[in-house]
């Protein structure tokens, strides 16, 4: 029996076949390399140095095991910074979601001049945060600020919005609400626009009120979007730094010192890098814990739907 | 024809070679310094130096206090040599000098035959040495800052009060008398950070306390508590938002005549105190050393020092500039033009300068008897921590006892 001999394959064709076979991997390579060097490596290096007493200026690098983590737990300021961050998260995220949903529902209705109002609504999101904080610092100014002048007009004493510990964190949260509620509006509006009109028409035929339509049609449909937007705002809230740095610097006292502010001070003011790395890792774990709760739930719902 | 061409070629060569030589001699120095009046003073010196040395160009980068320290740290640790001359606040020297980031100036004096002037005020000069106070010279003082107490002589006289006040209790009593809705009895820097700590320290020292005692936290002491309670008492006679006050606000309150006393001023802030064009209190304020209480209080030193980056590529020119900027002529010029306090003793008795700044003799005495803040590389961290708790007491988040105990725990953790 004569053997069939495969025709000789040219070098160019070999390369072409190899490329075809591995094209997916090749396309992934640049992004993977960037991810590896800019995310994975720093993450592991951060975890590594968190076990050392790493004083950058004195060039000290000594293995201390879990000491940095023990010091963190004992550090009243670190625990306080977690509490402050949670206080901010709770205030800002709650208001952003409630106001964002309300505005999105309004914009989804047949609103007059919607084409003009929508771009205006999302405008605050477009400003750089340092510009936003500079504007709000003027608005909050005790002597000449807008709020103080309004209060004086009504014969009331002005409030020290940023230097009174009872209002400082909420004042920062308000700036965040002003800047990021538009983001919630956009996501929720996208969800609302995916609801077909016939659902509402059917509900109206059955005599459902506006509130019943909102509770039984709108909310269940936008639940996924709501979860997503809450997750994103919570993650972003954990990273809160620039507004605090520019508006209060963490004060009065330590009342607006967030986790990121604590890490910044340890890392870039005292250059106590091992301790700052340990605090960063704790923050990462906190974000991961919150994210996991949401992502697991969302994943389960998506699987159920599939 | 050929001869002409040869001549032109020779001329062209000479011009090119000369041009290259001149270009090679051109030196660019980069000076990392402070902003504000410090920058103005340094620019006076830079302009004079560039005029005398046309081949040297000095670029000045002026930064605020906190940003400056971060920039210096990154610059020195990375060792790139981007900055040739670096200014330091005096507490920073105990962080940066032991790490060997700055050039030892002693060999440079030896090599160049220049002499370190005997006229330098010794306590200021010592702050530029490591080990402190007798080691090698790494930096020279360029701003003769010392903390002084400011009070309105006219108000004390009008109220029949002894002046200057001998104790902090006298200050509280006087502040109560002067507070009338128009004028605040006292003013101080109450903002969180370096401001509040530097305001509080002269009171703490007057009560006989200190932040670090024998290498340990000295914060949980009866002296500290008494000083803190007096500090809070002073707040009652200060503007309502004094807990946000920084140097500029204190200066504004003094110059406008709205404050009768200031817990502390640095002469570099208030050179125009007697200038009728900008001051409402010409000839009314006295700047003197601080009142005592349980013990007499030593004035706090706070000079700025200038050193050469050990990685600089132009150390010779940088050293030449350093000796130039600290020379009597340039220091006098900077004092006359922008009120920069000198670091040479003789200038404090110079008739022209004394006629412009009548507190100079008192300032010299304060500089010669002044005390430096603790010499530890951990001072920035300790100061920041203490500031947070002092501020909590000032704005009423914690009682003085609670704030003191929390500060003690935190500082003990830093020092362990």
Image: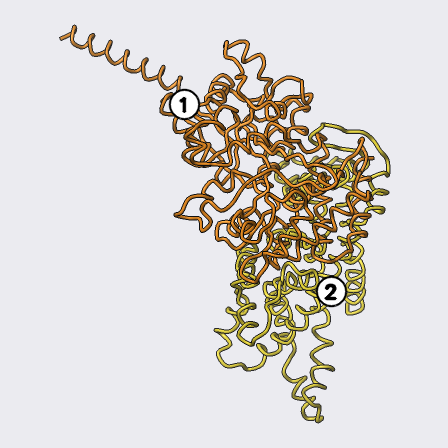
Determine if residue A306 is in view.
Answer: yes
Q: Chain of mark 1?
A: B
Q: Left or right: A52 with respect to B81?
A: right
Q: Colour of chain A?
A: yellow
Q: Where's residue B116, x and y in %?
A: 54, 16
Q: In the picture shown, does residue A244 fall above or below B303?
A: below
| Mark identifier at residue B56 | 1
Chain that bears disc 2:
A
CB under 8 Å between discs 1 and 2 = no
* Residue occupying the point 66% across, 68% down: A96
- The colour of chain B is orange
What secondary structure is found at the residue carrying circle 1? Answer: strand
Q: A27 or B179: nearer the eye?
A: B179
Is B256 in front, or is B12? B256
Q: Report crowding for label 1: few under 14, some 14 to 19, many 20 or more residues within 10 A (C-alpha).
A: some
Callout 2 secondary element? helix
Query: Residue B40's quadrant in the figure?
Result: top left
């Amino acid at each position: 029996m004569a053997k069939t001999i495969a025709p000789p394959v040219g070098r160019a064709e070999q390369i072409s076949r190899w490329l075809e076979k591995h094209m997916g991997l090749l396309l992934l390579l640049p992004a993977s390399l960037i991810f590896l060097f800019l995310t994975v490596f720093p993450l592991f290096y951060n975890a590594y140095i968190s076990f050392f007493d790493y004083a950058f200026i004195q060039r000290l690098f000594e293995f201390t095991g879990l000491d940095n983590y023990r010091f963190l737990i004992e550090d009243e300021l670190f625990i306080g910074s977690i509490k402050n961050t949670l206080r901010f998260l709770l205030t800002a995220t709650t208001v952003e979601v409630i106001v964002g949903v309300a505005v999105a529902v309004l914009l989804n209705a047949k609103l007059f001049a919607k084409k003009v109002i929508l771009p205006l609504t999302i405008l605050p999101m477009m400003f750089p945060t340092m510009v936003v904080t500079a504007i709000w610092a003027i608005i909050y100014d005790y002597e000449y600020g807008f709020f103080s002048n309004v209060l004086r007009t009504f014969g009331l004493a002005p409030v020290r919005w940023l230097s009174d510990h009872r209002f400082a964190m909420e004042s920062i949260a308000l700036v965040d609400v002003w800047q990021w509620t538009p983001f919630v509006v956009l996501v929720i509006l996208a969800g609302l626009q995916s609801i077909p009109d016939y659902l509402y028409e059917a509900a109206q035929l059955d005599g459902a009120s506006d509130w019943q339509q909102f509770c039984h049609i709108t909310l269940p449909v936008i639940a996924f979007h709501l979860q997503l937007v809450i997750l994103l705002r919570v993650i972003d809230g954990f990273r809160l730094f620039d507004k605090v740095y520019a508006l209060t610097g963490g004060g009065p006292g330590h009342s607006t010192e967030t986790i990121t502010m604590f890490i910044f001070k340890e890392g870039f003011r005292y250059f106590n890098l091992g301790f700052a790395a340990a605090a960063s890792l704790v923050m990462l774990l906190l974000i991961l814990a919150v994210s996991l709760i949401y992502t697991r739930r969302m994943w389960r719902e998506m699987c159920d739907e599939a | 024809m050929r001869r002409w061409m040869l001549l032109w070629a020779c001329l062209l060569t000479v011009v090119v070679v000369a041009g290259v030589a001149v270009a090679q001699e051109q030196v660019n120095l980069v000076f990392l310094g402070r902003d504000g009046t410090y920058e103005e003073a340094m620019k006076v010196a830079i302009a004079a130096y560039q005029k005398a040395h046309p081949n040297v160009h000095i670029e000045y980068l002026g930064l605020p206090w906190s940003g400056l320290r971060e920039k210096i740290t990154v610059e020195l640790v990375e060792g790139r040599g981007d900055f040739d001359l670096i200014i330091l606040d005096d507490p920073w020297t105990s962080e940066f000098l032991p790490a060997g980031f700055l050039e030892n100036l002693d060999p440079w004096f030896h090599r160049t035959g220049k002499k370190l002037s005997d006229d330098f005020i010794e306590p200021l000069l010592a702050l530029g040495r490591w080990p402190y106070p007798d080691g090698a010279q790494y930096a020279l003082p360029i701003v003769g800052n010392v903390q002084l107490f400011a009070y309105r002589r006219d108000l004390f006289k009008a109220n029949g009060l002894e002046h200057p006040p001998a104790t902090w209790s006298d200050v509280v009593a006087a502040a109560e008398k002067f507070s009338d809705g128009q004028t605040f009895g006292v003013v101080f820097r109450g903002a969180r950070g370096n401001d509040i700590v530097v305001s509080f320290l002269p009171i703490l020292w007057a009560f006989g306390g200190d932040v670090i005692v024998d290498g340990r936290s000295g914060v949980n002491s009866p002296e500290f508590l008494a000083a803190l309670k007096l500090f809070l008492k002073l707040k009652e006679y200060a503007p309502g938002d004094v807990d946000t006050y920084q140097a500029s606000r204190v200066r504004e309150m003094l110059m406008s005549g709205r404050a009768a006393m200031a817990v502390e001023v640095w002469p570099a802030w208030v050179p125009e105190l007697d200038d009728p064009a900008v001051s409402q209190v010409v000839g009314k304020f006295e700047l003197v050393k601080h009142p005592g209480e349980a013990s007499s209080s030593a004035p706090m030193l706070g000079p700025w020092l200038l050193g050469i980056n050990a990685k600089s590529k132009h150390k010779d020119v940088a050293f030449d500039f350093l000796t130039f900027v600290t020379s009597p002529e340039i220091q006098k010029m900077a004092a006359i033009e922008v009120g920069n306090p000198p670091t040479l003793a003789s200038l404090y008795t110079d008739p022209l300068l004394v006629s412009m700044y009548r507190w100079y003799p008192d300032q010299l005495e304060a500089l010669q008897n002044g005390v430096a803040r603790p010499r530890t590389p951990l001072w920035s961290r300790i100061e920041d921590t203490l500031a947070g708790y002092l501020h909590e007491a000032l704005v009423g988040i914690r009682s003085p006892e609670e704030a003191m105990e929390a500060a003690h725990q935190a500082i003990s953790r830093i020092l362990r």
